[in-house]
Image: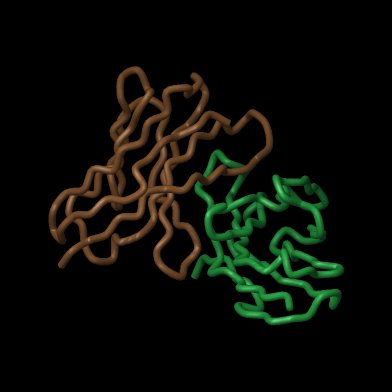
Amino acid sequence: EAQVTQNPRYLITVTGKKLTVTCSQNMNHEYMSWYRQDPGLGLRQIYYSMNVEVTDKGDVPEGYKVSRKEKRNFPLILESPSPNQTSLYFCASSLRGLYNEQFFGPGTRLTVL
Amino acid sequence: DAKTTQPNSMESNEEEPVHLPCNHSTISGTDYIHWYRQLPSQGPEYVIHGLTSNVNNRMASLAIAEDRKSSTLILHRATLRDAAVYYCILRAPLQGAQKLVFGQGTRLTINP
């Protein structure tokens, strides 16, 4: 089944403890992206990647890192999480940028205490 | 990115057609009109997109005004599963950052 998977789906952590949220797609998509969703602020893009080894900042990249070493994986790294990074995170992918429909993962609910 | 305006909420009945409007008066000639929806507790889901002509797919139809300043997403026969937040987004694929800018969307309620 074609899909975008995220792990973990739920995570509660403490301030400053490094964490990684994984994102993987099995559709051979070139484009991948991370969004966060907050009440009243909607979905905002954190980082995106047009292809392997090519990443770029979105609207809210501060406090996040990403890497794209393989086509299928696009992990989101929080080196030192803070409470303002408590949010619902979505990974998305598409065949080639925004010419094509975006497929979204099921989301990761992160709470930073 | 050009701005879109959608009603905050709409309500309809099951098995009836639903017309979800979107205004985009500052749309440019290269902006595509995308629609996504987000069902409760799920990630957004692609619905349809178009440039100038009306578009149909298995999920919905997209009617685009002749001047392209507005569009309407049409669900021909709503089901309870269509209850979601619907987002109308403008995107010029070759311009600017490669991102979808989601507004607040329209929350659609379907009554049994």
As drawn, is B98 to the left or to the right of B62? right
Horizontal and vertical percent position of residue B26: 48, 22
In the image, is B84 to the left or to the right of A50? left
Q: Which quadrant: the N terminus of chain B?
A: top right
Q: Quadrant of residue B112?
A: bottom left
Task: Identify the image quadrant of residue B12.
Answer: bottom left
Expressed as whole percent of the image width and height from the top left, the position of residue B6 reads 38, 40
* Residue B73 horizontal/vertical position (percent): 30, 41
Above or below, B46 relative to A78: above
Left or right placement of residue A81 versus residue A106 in this view: right
Q: Which chain is brown?
A: B
Q: Position of residue B104 (x, y in %)?
A: 46, 48
Question: Up-down: is B14 above or below B76?
Answer: below
Colouring scheme applied when the structure was drawn: by chain
Write the residue at 67% across / 31% down.
Answer: B96
Q: Residue at x 18, y 64 (%)?
A: B111
Q: Nearer the viewer, residue A85 or B80?
A: A85
Nearer to the camera, A90 or B94 = A90
Residue drawn at point x = 59 percent, y = 49 percent: A95
How many numbered discs, if any? 0
State which quadrant residue A113 falls in: bottom right
Residue at screen point 63% across, 66% down:
A87
Chain drawn in green: A
Question: Taking B7 as reference, is B4 above or below it?
Answer: above
Toward the viewer: B112 or B61?
B112
